[in-house]
Image (spheres, rainbow, N blue to C red):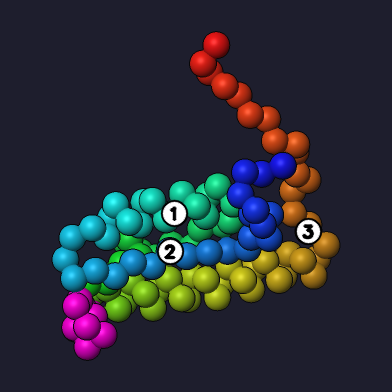
Amino acid sequence: MDHCAGLNLFSFKPGAVVVSARRAGTTATLDQMNKYLLYAQMPVVSSRYWNMVHGQTPEEVLEDKEGVQIMRVAGKNMAWLLRCMQAGKEKGISHPEQEERINTNFIR
């Protein structure tokens, strides 16, 4: 049994973490949030750079041309992955068989 209630609901569903901040903190936030997707066995959708934009208001975010492009590429990558997954499903490709979880305690 997994440690988080409902965690299996997200297995094999693609996810993308997107962070926005005025200035600092986006990389640490992105790293932390991506760990939840990995823990849940979710394919992580990326862009050509880290999925983040900068700005204090929505209008300022739109001025972050690089960040807006990163979001656009991430959206296209998500759409592509979803189409690939659907094509695989139509060809009878199923998710990997799940193994029972093994927890190891290194403190003896």
Q: Nearer the viewer, mark 1 or mark 3?
A: 1
Specify which label sits upstream in the sequence, 1 or 3: 1
Q: Amino acid at mark 3?
A: Ile
Please say whether residue 61 is one of the residues in the magenta stretch. Answer: yes
Q: Is residue 16 above or below residue 43?
A: below
Q: Where is residue 96 shown, x and y percent of the image?
A: 74, 48
How many angstroms separate mark 2 from mark 1 (CA)? 6 Å
Give the prevailing secondary structure in the magenta stretch. Answer: helix
Give the CA distance from mark 1 to mark 3: 26 Å
| Element class at badge 3 | loop
| Marked residue nearer the N-terminal end (2 or 1) | 2
Q: For residue 33: magenta?
A: no
Q: Residue furthest top?
A: 108
Q: Which residues are magenta?
A: 55-65
Label drawn at residue 17: 2
Percent coordinates x, y for residue 46 in the rendering: 43, 62
